[in-house]
Amino acid sequence: MKLKKSVILMSMLGAAMMALVGCGSSDSTTTATSEGTKTEATTSSQDTVASASIALPASVTFNEDGNAVVEHKYGTTVVPKDPQRVISIKMEDLLLALDIDFIAGRNFDGFYLEDEMNEKGIASISVDEEANTVNYEEILSYEPDLIIIRDAFDQTVYDELSKIAPTIAFNLQDKVNSTLAIGAVFGMEDEAKARIEQYNQFLADANEKLHEAIGDETVAMLRILKNEIRLYPYSANEMSEFLYAEDGLGLEPDPMAVEYDTTDNLAISMETLPDLQADNIILIAGYGSADQESVEAAKARYDEIKADPLWSKVPAVESGNVYEVDSRIWLNHGLICTEKKVQELVDLLTANK
């Protein structure tokens, strides 16, 4: 993998937002009840480390020796030329999307990239999801010459990994800019641009198919956890934004998703469920890659909700338009991940119309 000289790849957000780098904030969940609404701070659940860790996409320049220099959330890293023993930690989606070789990455049973990684002979690295850290001795055993991580870890994790090998970090939620930056690092600018064009065309084709199937029917995205029901907003959360964006699927949102678009998600009480007027519901019951006990608890909670008379009053429920999707895909981020979400949605909605 040869590195090419390139112009600077900078974030579309620009320098005006640099003050956000390194600053953390807790996720905000708005709770709707029959008496009104209230906003309260909550900690981010597994696979939605999102808001507190969002940083600008990394920028890439090249020094006079021809090495890529990556500025990212944790600092600045000079990338070795032609790295051969690359390790990925939660950036597998974008590396596979660009067909970049890496020797080891995060993998587990049921992971949406499990089969592809196994077919390529990519070794599995464990990630402690609860503590949000990794086994440094395990990483060291692979003798990496470059480590690529998602910028959702604490600074201390990056610092320790940097002692093992040069480490660069990218914002997985900003998948387009991060794909372009990774492409620059590996001398694959043209390939990265082509992959983004392929992704955009995939969304455009799906947009057309979905509008042929459901027209202007409204769509809501709900997540069932063991202790609450969450409605995802119109544009304030990357996991649901692609459903409604004009350059995404362009679907019509439920009015409540628009009303509460100022927060990452809205916790809905059972009493307010009938206020949800969606014609179609995308339903996630689970915690993605979390422990099986939490997943089973969420499934049990969904069974309880389905038995409640208030659930049957929701239009999508009455018409049989509730589509349960795979939480291991829908609670993740990336190009391949989003394409899998879109394909699942197209298959479900077109088959039922």
Image (spheres, rainbow, N blue to C red):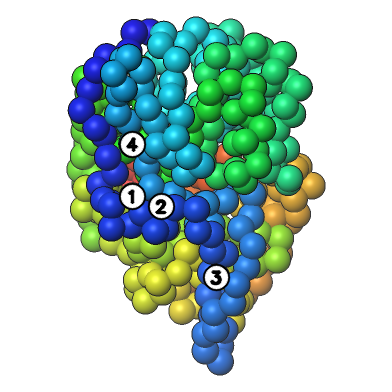
SS label for mark 3: strand
> As rendered, which of 114 and 143 lies closer to the eye?
143
Q: Nearer the viewer, mark 1 or mark 3?
A: 3
Q: Which residue is mark 2?
A: 238
- Label located before the other in sequence (2 or 3): 3
- Label located before the other in sequence (4 or 1): 4
Q: What residue type is disc 4 on?
A: Ser
Between the residue at mark 1 and the residue at mark 3, the CA separation in whole angstroms equals 20 Å
Between the residue at mark 2 and the residue at mark 4, the CA separation in whole angstroms equals 21 Å
> As rendered, which of 270 and 95 lies closer to the eye?
95
SS label for mark 1: helix
SS label for mark 4: strand
- Label located before the other in sequence (4 or 3): 3
Q: Residue at x 30, y 29 (%)?
A: 61
Q: Which residue is mark 1?
A: 242
Q: Disc 1, disc 2: CB below 8 Å?
A: yes
- Disc 1 crowd rating (10 Å Cα; few below 14, some 14-19, many 20+) is some
Q: Which residue is mark 4?
A: 59
